[in-house]
Image: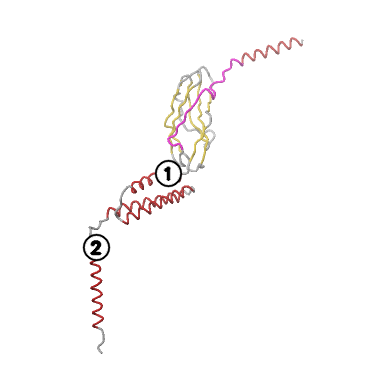
Amino acid sequence: MKFSRLMITLACFSLLSTLCSGVVFGFDTNDGTVTVTFSDETPAQGSNIVINVLFTNLGSKQIEVLRFGLHFDWMESTQFVGPDLSSNPLTIPAGGSYTFSTIVLEIPSDVSVGTHSYFVGMDGFEEGQSESFSWDSTPDEIVVQSFWQDTYNDLLEQTSSNISTAENKTYDSPDAQSYLQQAQNSYSAALEYAAQQNWEDAISALQSASMYLEQAETEEENYIEPEPGQDLTLIIVGASIAAVAIIVILLVLLRKKPKE
């Protein structure tokens, strides 16, 4: 009896092993790979970016994709951004690739500044399988920057270019030269504020620099350069007027002098 029970147990174990060896677990993590590109690698709070995702089917069978999207750590657990293909599934052959393009993502204005994680998710069917699968890529990271920092970077590039252009000019107007110097000082102050991550003051300083540059251009356009010898003529005329004025004063004083 003990021998019979042992034989039955071994037979059952052998049958279970045979059944399990035929089980297909479906599309898994190693059967696919993605390459994600962002229109802005360091997007700012409140900005919109466009995402392209190249997916490659590394499995041995073709798949039908029902849903495809990206999940970022600030989203609800079930939230993804990407196309819903359930009404018209996409077929990707074994070894084939497909680019999911122009996926638009809005970065929340209140999301924290810094590093955030994300992954790509996909639902579909593998050829020969009646049960659908859910596939997730290996997590990756994206850096979100401050809205003010993004504004500063855009303004910095523009202001830097304008100052370089102004420095390559030769201003004849003394006032224009003075305004250019003030613009350079404000630009330097903006860099110092930025080093301290004081973005609002840095932006204000860059705006001041732009204003000074505009004033320099205006002064230079309205400036009339004195003709040669004009300065000397003005000095002589001024001196002559002063001399006449002194003589007139002396005459007046002499006339008022009382008689003895």
Between 208 and 83, the one lying in front of the other is 208
**Callout 1: helix, strand or loop?**
helix
Residue drawn 69% across and 12% down?
10
Would you say residue 27 sits in the magenta stretch?
yes
Dot in front, 1 or 2: 2
Q: Amino acid at mark 2?
A: Leu
Number of other residues with Cα within 10 Å of mark 1, as a class: few under 14, some 14 to 19, many 20 or more: some
Quarter of the image for residue 105 reads top left
Residue 144 placement (x, y as % from top left): 48, 40
Magenta-highlighted residues: 20-41
The mark found on residue 232 in the picture is: 2
Instruction: Write the residue at 24% across / 82% down.
Output: 254
Residue at x 57% of width, y 20% of height: 25
Q: Is residue 91 at least partly visible in the picture?
A: no
For label 2, the SS is helix
Residue picked out by circle 1:
153
Establish if 179 lies above or below 70. below
Residue 182 is situated, as x and y percent measured from the top left of the image, at 38, 54
Residue 49 at what x, y percent from top left? 43, 36
**Residue type highlighted by circle 1:** Asn
The answer to whether any part of residue 24 appears in the image is: yes
Q: Is residue 226 magenta?
A: no
Decide which of tag 1 and tag 2 comes sooner along the chain. Answer: 1
Query: Tags 1 and 2 in contact by the CB under 8 Å rule?
Result: no
Instruction: Report the colour scheme.
Output: secondary structure
